[in-house]
Amino acid sequence: MDFRQAQADILAVLRDSPIVRDSVVANVREFVQVGEIGHAFDTLCSWLYEDELPISRALYQRLSTLSAQLEMPEPMDRLDELIRD
């Protein structure tokens, strides 16, 4: 996966996610900015799950695609429980 594309994809998913905590948004953006794509993705998924934020099937699919591209299946564990259409 192209590094710049991964950065853009994570920021796009973050923007479209239901996460509204400024500290979490800033944390994910900071990880992306310093090149810690894996940490950014893990943090994003962790907060979705921890805060039990509802996500659309489309957002779940985008996260799933990113998970496969980053070869990081663990952050996706149980996110399917959050799907609300």
Image (cartoon, helix red, strand yellow):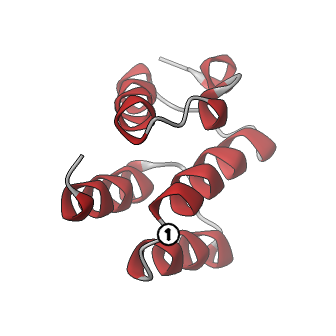
Q: Residue at x 66, y 40 (%)?
A: 53
Q: Is residue 15 left or right of residue 3?
A: right
Give the answer, above or below, for where 13 lies relative to 85: below
Give the answer, above or below, for where 44 lies relative to 25: above
The foreground one among 34 and 12 is 34
Secondary structure at badge 1 equals: loop
- x and y percent of residue 35 in the render? 41, 74
Q: Which residue is situated farthest in the right direction here?
A: 50
Q: Residue at x 45, y 27 (%)?
A: 60
Q: Residue at x 37, y 38 (%)?
A: 66
Residue that mark 1 sits on = 36
Amino acid type at image mark 1: Glu
Q: Is residue 19 left or right of residue 61?
A: right
The foreground one among 20 and 3 is 3
Q: Is residue 51 left or right of residue 56?
A: right
- x and y percent of residue 63 in the render? 43, 35
Image-quadrant location for residue 62: top left
Q: Residue at x 70, y 47 (%)?
A: 46
